[in-house]
Image (cartoon, helix red, strand yellow):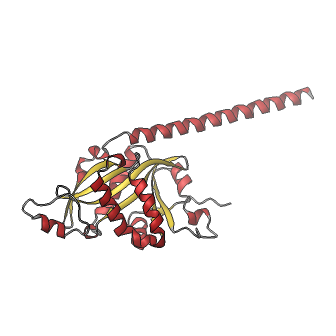
Amino acid sequence: MASMEVKQKAMVAFNKEKKKMKRKEVLEKKKAVDRAIKAASVVKDHLVFYTPFRQFNRNGLSMYLESGSGEQLSSPLKSYIQTLLKVNMEGPYGPEWLVEEKIKRREMVASEARYIFVRENVDNTTSLEEAESTSRIKWSSNDDNIVGFLHYRFTVEEDVPVVYIYELQLESFIQNKGLGKFLMRLIELISRKNHMRAVVLTVQKANFAAMNFYTKKLGYTISSISPSKVDPLQNGYGKSYEILCKTFDQEAKAKLEEEIYV
């Protein structure tokens, strides 16, 4: 009898120690994730590590890229971003745009917002009027020639450090020429270099071109955290978007891609 009690006490002690070790392991993982996010976020210019990627000269386009942050946007630049967002996204969002536009205005100036701006290389022999005539969105300063941007952040999804793409917006005349794919490959390189384990983004279901671009051309998949996967019987009923992802290791894949059956 005494022997049984000793075994039971030993088992209880073992289980307590096991739980303690598990909690310690979880805490250490969380600290590691927090360190990775902090380290990535303090870098002012991630493009400095990718000098060859600063230029894009293909399919009749001559562009160069530069970094920016939400807390440093000038008033003209804020106005440009708002205008381009409305031109590109009002249609896919439909009636939701009135609310969504206000949300996006707050998001774009957040301190954690990081940007890659696309500027057009304008030939010095080209008149300002000729240069502007190629662009549907008129920039408010004669010294600037931004024609698109990518807004991203370093954050956490399901305990996984990720790059979350909030926006990839290009003016119409530079779309479908390989620049979007170029920017996505670049952001994947930035993600890996900064120890992020996935790239995550949101796409409106009504935006068929964007959905095809990410899933067919770039190999992104509908994430297990997307509304249609969280509630497959309802197929995300009432939600107008899908969450897509591309993971870089098995643990991230298990948490963000693989379906969980209950």
Residue 238 visible? The answer is yes
Q: Residue at x 14, y 60 (%)?
A: 122
Residue 207 visible? The answer is no
Quadrant of the rendered image containing residue 211: bottom left
Furthest residue toward right:
1
Give the side of residue 128 with respect to residue 253, left or right: left
What x and y, as percent, mark residue 56?
Answer: 22, 58
Q: Residue at x 39, y 72 (%)?
A: 209
Q: Is residue 25 above or below residue 56?
A: above
What x and y, as percent, mark residue 81?
Answer: 33, 59
What x and y, as percent, mark residue 191?
Answer: 39, 48
Quadrant of the rendered image containing residue 119: bottom left
Q: Nearer the viewer, residue 209 or 125?
A: 125
Q: Nearer the viewer, residue 223 or 168?
A: 168
Quadrant assignment for the N terminus? top right
Q: How many marks on residues?
A: 0
Q: Residue at x 52, y 54 (%)?
A: 253
Quadrant assignment for the C terminus? bottom right
Q: Is residue 39 above or below residue 159?
A: above
What x and y, as percent, mark residue 104?
Answer: 42, 58
Furthest residue toward left:
125
Q: Residue at x 55, y 67 (%)?
A: 239
